[in-house]
């Protein structure tokens, strides 16, 4: 390790260019302060559970959350939730052979629409209106398995 920093030097650490991410394993009452300070410096962070001792601190920390999942066969997925950004009910899944846009993915007021583009060809499919409150994860095997 080239450098080490004390608690008093935390901001200097975040500004040093030496770290891309921090792991917050402090006493619970310090989670919010140190996580927010890292986020404001555009440093990735992983915060130990519990996120924070109060719901108001959790809400402050939850302004933007990203999760990155890795699956067998070099398959990965990233999900970003931002409560401070413009309202959007769509998301895009990007793969090596194309993209899938799911529109009204989180809404229940209208049809669900998939726009699949593979090798420059686009197909669109719609699904009837239904509750979208709970996401469903399905295992889709990778090609060649």
Image: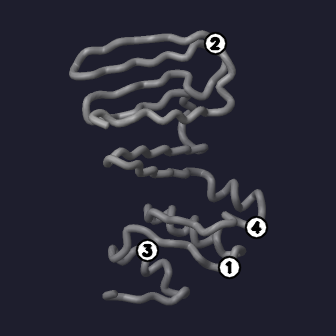
Q: Which residue is mark 1?
A: 27
3 or 1: mark nearer the eye: 1
Question: Is tag 1's residue or tag 2's residue first in the polypeptide sequence?
Answer: 1
Give the alpha-carbon distance from disc 3 to disc 1, as whole Å: 19 Å
Q: Residue 42, image x and y in percent?
A: 44, 61
Residue 129's disc is 2
- Residue at horizontal 69%, vertical 66%? 50
The one of 87 and 93 positioned closer to us in this rendering: 93
Question: Is tag 4's residue or tag 3's residue first in the polypeptide sequence?
Answer: 3
- Residue at horizontal 36%, vertical 88%? 3
Marks 1/2 in contact by CB < 8 Å: the verdict is no
Task: Tell me if mark 2 has few (under 14), some (14-19) or many (20+) residues whose alpha carbon lies within 10 angstroms of its own.
Answer: few
Q: Residue 107, image x and y in percent?
A: 63, 24
Q: Quadrant of the C terminus?
A: top left
**Picture layout, residue 130 above or below residue 42:** above
Marks 2/4 in contact by CB < 8 Å: the verdict is no
Give the alpha-carbon distance from disc 2 to disc 3, as whole Å: 46 Å
Marks 1/4 in contact by CB < 8 Å: the verdict is no
Residue 53's disc is 4
Mark 2 falls on what kind of element?
loop
Q: Residue 65, image x and y in percent?
A: 55, 51
Give the alpha-carbon distance from disc 1 to disc 2, as whole Å: 46 Å
Give the alpha-carbon distance from disc 2 to disc 4, as whole Å: 39 Å
Question: Is tag 1's residue or tag 4's residue first in the polypeptide sequence?
Answer: 1
**Picture layout, residue 72 above or below residue 87:** below
Q: Which residue is mark 3?
A: 14
Give the alpha-carbon distance from disc 1 to disc 4, as whole Å: 10 Å
Quarter holding residue 53? bottom right
Question: Is tag 2's residue or tag 3's residue first in the polypeptide sequence?
Answer: 3
2 or 3: mark nearer the eye: 2
């Amino acid at each position: 390790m080239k450098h080490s920093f004390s608690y008093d030097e935390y901001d200097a650490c975040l500004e040093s260019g030496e770290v891309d991410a921090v792991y917050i394993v402090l006493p619970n009452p310090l989670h919010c302060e140190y996580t927010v300070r890292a986020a404001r410096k555009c440093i990735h962070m992983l915060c130990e559970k519990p996120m924070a001792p109060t719901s108001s601190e959790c809400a402050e920390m939850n302004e933007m959350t990203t999760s990155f999942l890795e699956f067998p066969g070099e398959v990965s997925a990233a999900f970003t939730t931002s409560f401070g950004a413009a309202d959007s009910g769509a998301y895009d899944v990007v793969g090596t052979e194309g993209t899938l846009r799911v529109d009204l993915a989180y809404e229940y007021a209208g049809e669900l629409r998939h726009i699949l583009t593979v090798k420059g060809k686009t197909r669109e499919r719609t699904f009837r209106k239904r509750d979208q409150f709970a996401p469903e994860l399905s295992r889709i095997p990778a090609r060649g398995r």
